Amino acid sequence: MANNYFSFKQFTVYQENTAMKVCTDACLLGAIVAKALSNSPTEIENILDIGTGTGLLALMLAQETKASIDAVELSGAAAAQARQNVLQSPWANRIRVIEKDICDVTPSAPYDFIISNPPFFEQDLKSPNQAKNAAKHDTQLTLAPLLEHINRLLAPLGTAALLLPHHRTAYVESLLTQQQLFMYKKIEVQQTAAHPYFRSILFFGRENIPAQFSNMYIAETDKSYSDTFSALLEPYYLKL
């Protein structure tokens, strides 16, 4: 398999398995969440990244916060890759890669913030490539138990964020209600202004406050990045 690289300004994330390569929408999630946390009026002391993969999201949040970060990954190969990426970064002393099923994670204290880019395309057509299926589909953990674990691990005043296929948004909103969690921000994402929405980013927590809604698109029709996307990712990308 070919090797994949994602160049930060500070270092490079390396990914050996092309089935789990770094995606633009994952980078967008990291940038949006990092900006929100850096602007938070309350200090975020500890963060949980569920299904860290290469460690990308944990690294992006480490760049913009002072929090300690637990990056949980079930796959041994992916966890090893995440450790390699963390060790070459400037924030290795604040990121702990944990090779474990999220069901077995029992931290000493609940988390102020939880982030996940879940590989859950429930009931969608699967690829014949088994590695790709494992990376993109809900073969081991579905959205309902994921939210149960987020609820279990979240601090009383903690918040969380998920990246989702847009067509799963209403379903996840219903799951939040079941868990007595409340969405307070939803960002719907398009490839371009001419495309339908294909991703949603949901922020939620235990406090029932009026939700904020917004949308954005990644690229212009000429395939250049939009101004909004460029501003969000400028702290990370070497070149936009």
Image (cartoon, rainbow, N blue to C red):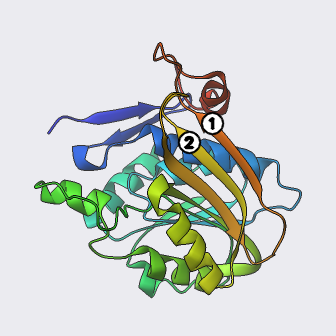
Q: Secondary structure at mark 1?
A: strand
Question: Is residue 174 depicted above or below 162 in this figure?
Answer: below
Which quadrant of the view contains residue 137?
A: bottom left
- On screen, residue 182 versus residue 165, left or right, reads right
The answer to whether any part of residue 165 appears in the image is no
Q: Which mark is residue 70?
A: none
Residue 41 lies, in percent from the top left, at 89, 57
Dot 1, crowdedness within 10 Å: few (<14), some or many (≥20)?
some
Q: Are marks 2 and 1 in contact (CB under 8 Å)?
A: yes
Dot 2, crowdedness within 10 Å: few (<14), some or many (≥20)?
many
Per the image, the residue denoted by label 1 is 216
Residue at image point 46% right, 82% down: 145
Residue 117 lies, in percent from the top left, at 47, 58
Per the image, the residue denoted by label 2 is 189
Residue 168 lies, in percent from the top left, at 46, 62
Q: Nearest the camera: 55 or 215?
A: 215
The answer to whether any part of residue 221 appears in the image is yes
Kind of residue indicated by mark 1: Met
Residue at image point 56% right, 47% down: 29
Q: Nearest the camera: 213 or 50?
A: 213
Residue that protrudes farthest toward the right in the picture:
41
Residue that protrudes farthest toward the left in the picture:
128
Q: Secondary structure at mark 2?
A: strand
Question: Is residue 194 depicted above or below 107 in this figure?
Answer: above
Quadrant where the N terminus sits is: top left
- On screen, residue 227 versus residue 50, left or right, reads right
Mark 2 → mark 1, Cα distance in angstroms: 5 Å
Residue 23 lies, in percent from the top left, at 40, 41
Which quadrant of the view contains residue 170?
A: bottom right
Whichever of labels 2 and 1 marks the residue nearer the N terminus, that label is 2
Kind of residue indicated by mark 2: Val
